[in-house]
Amino acid sequence: MVKGIQQIVTLILALFIGLFIASSFFLRAEYNYSLYGDRAVLEGQQPLVFLLWIVVVLGLGYVLYRLSRKLEGYSRAKVIPAVLLVSCIMQAVIIFLFTRMPTDDSQTVLSLAWAMLYDKDYSSFQSGGYLYMFPFNFSFVLYLKTLLLLFPDNYLVIKSFNILFSLVTTLVIYLLCQELKPKSDRKDYGLLIVAATYIPAMFMSNFIYNDGIATALLTSALYFGVRFIRIRSMKDMLFAAVLLTLGNYFRSIGMIFLIAIVLSLLLNLRAVGVKRIIAAIGITLLLWGLPSWIQNAALQATGVVSESPSSHSAPVYMWLNMGLNLETLGF
């Protein structure tokens, strides 16, 4: 029965990926801030350009494959730091060559961090303010405020931490692959290289958003969740629960990872043991809302707000409308 459920889930995921790949032959998402502002626009695919990129990517894929095969003879202690260093240098070059100043939401949250740090101004939580409607972004404001307090007040500091979290994500993706194939003798450096040089991820380090830190935390939570299923150490599950909670605090897509981890635990109920699974799920759910509860309690205790900030947050249908309306479909 468990194997049947796993096959159904795999089939559903394969259908989604197949739909995404098939649609890319007809549609493309273009992000051009100077033309469209801070949103992506769906347009018809350009077949010749698209085919050219396919050829380029396949060629690069072959080069990376050959490179990864040559590196198989070297130890992980040498290859992993070298690949991460190259990725770090490439991202630093991108930051200096394609300088991106904060705009829209990123400029707003950065301004709020400055206001709170230097002027002790928390008025944004009041009616009509940005955090009154979007209180979930306070976590990122708090993160930026901490960086500005501890380090020089400079965009490069924030972007340097983006690079750091990008490298963490790259490493964890590689470790997760190794965890899923514990008996394999191959070092799979190809995956490490692809993750380290994935162009969209490298360019994201140039933006001041919460994607970098949230992705690093949530991917790490997934790694420790998988490790717990294999080794059955509650220490790994505790790490997974803490990282999952923190990742969700910075970006609420953590629910997707929570579902994935809980579903994986239930599918491995017999192998791991009922008591361990119950304890693992219990720890995860117990920690899940803790950061938000502490944050709201602290804000109310200091008089910044008189009630829970989440009571005024933007409704879910606002985000659904943003993605499904005809003008900005897919945003």
Image (cartoon, grey):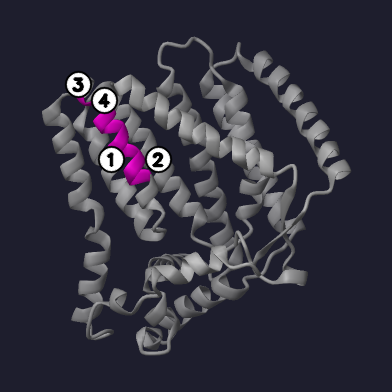
> Badge 1, how many Cα within 10 Å: few under 14, some, many 20+?
some
Would residue 266 be counted in the magenta stretch?
Answer: yes
Q: Are marks 4 and 2 in contact (CB under 8 Å)?
A: no
Q: Are marks 2 and 3 in contact (CB under 8 Å)?
A: no
Q: Nearer the viewer, mark 3 or mark 1?
A: 3
Q: Are marks 2 and 1 in contact (CB under 8 Å)?
A: yes
154 over 237 or under it: above or below:
below
Magenta highlight: main SS: helix
Amino acid at the residue labelled 4 = Asn
Q: Are marks 3 and 4 in contact (CB under 8 Å)?
A: yes
Q: Position of residue 219 (x, y in %)?
A: 43, 41
Q: Quadrant of the N terminus?
A: top left
| Residue corresponding to mark 3 | 270
User: Which secondary structure, mark 3?
Assistant: helix
| Residue corresponding to mark 1 | 239
> Badge 3, how many Cα within 10 Å: few under 14, some, many 20+?
few
Would residue 286 be counted in the magenta stretch?
Answer: no
User: Which secondary structure, mark 1?
Assistant: helix
Bounds of the magenta span?
Answer: 257-269
The foreground one among 293 and 46 is: 46
Q: Nearer the viewer, mark 2 or mark 3?
A: 3
Amino acid at the residue labelled 1 = Phe
Q: On the rendered structure, is 176 left or right of 293? A: right
Q: On the rendered structure, is 84 left or right of 90? A: left
> Badge 4, how many Cα within 10 Å: few under 14, some, many 20+?
some
| Residue corresponding to mark 4 | 268
| Residue corresponding to mark 2 | 220
Q: Position of residue 257 (x, y in %)?
A: 37, 44
User: Which secondary structure, mark 2?
Assistant: helix
